[in-house]
Image: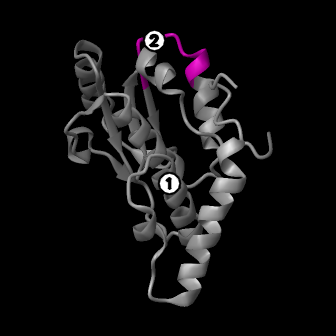
Amino acid sequence: MGWRNASRTRNMGAMKARGDVLCFIDDDVSLDFEHLFEVAQVIHRDEGLFVWHDPPHLLIIKTEDFFSGGGYDERFRPTMGETVELKLRLRRNGLKEFQFAPEMVCLRHLKEHPNPRYLLNQKHLTWAYLEYRYLPLWRLVWRKNPLEFARRVKWVLEWLLYRRYQRKSILSKR
């Protein structure tokens, strides 16, 4: 495995956790833990629900649902692509997203910062959309700008030739 990223760290934390409900949050947020605990109780009580919000990243899910879904995909570098990919995979597995607003737990970023990794985010989101066929291929690739079109074709080829055959996470079977 190459780099260590947030996905691998979250998967390792999930393997060590002993509770029935897992909660993943970014390290640069503030929130009200009492309200967070109330939302976690709803997830624990009801079947087939998960809470997802991004950005900042927040995931509350039953432990068994997280492991049956395969955890976070570790092939993504630390950007927001891996969280969107996990959300799409959980939906495909039949889980329902709990109607969540960040105000329910007073969730907010401690510091707002511009995203200098915009292209990397777009690349990883394109990969997630390819894997789950979220959008037709032509919608992912077609752009009026020839440079942007070439960039999208390159990302699709990278996914088809390389990323598709890598191991997804330490939780995956192969």
Q: Give the labeled residue for mark 2.
A: 19
Mark pair 1, 2: CA separation: 33 Å
Graded by Cα atoms within 10 Å as few (under 14), some (14 to 19) or many (20 or more), the crowding at tag 2 reads few
Comes first in the chain, label 1 or label 2:
2
The residue depicted at 51 percent of the width and 69 percent of the height is 115
Q: Is residue 139 visible?
A: yes
Mark 1 residue type: Leu
> Please, is residue 17 above or below residue 148 in the view?
above
Q: Quadrant of the N terminus?
A: top right
Q: How far from the left and from the top, in percent, is residue 64?
A: 44, 15
Q: Which label was assigned to residue 147? A: none
Report the mark closest to the observer, 1 or 2: 1
Mark 2 residue type: Gly
The residue depicted at 45 percent of the width and 81 percent of the height is 143
> Please, is residue 160 above or below residue 2 in the view?
below
The residue depicted at 53 percent of the width and 47 percent of the height is 82
- Which segment is the magenta one? 14-22
Q: How far from the left and from the top, in percent, is residue 116?
A: 57, 72
Q: Is residue 120 magenta?
A: no
Q: Give the labeled residue for mark 1.
A: 130
- Return the residue nearer the eye: 173 or 7: 173
> Please, is residue 14 above or below residue 118 in the view?
above
Q: Is residue 118 left or right of residue 109?
A: right
The residue depicted at 46 percent of the width and 34 percent of the height is 24
Determine the residue located farthest toward the right in the rendered image. 2
- Return the residue nearer the eye: 91 or 134: 134
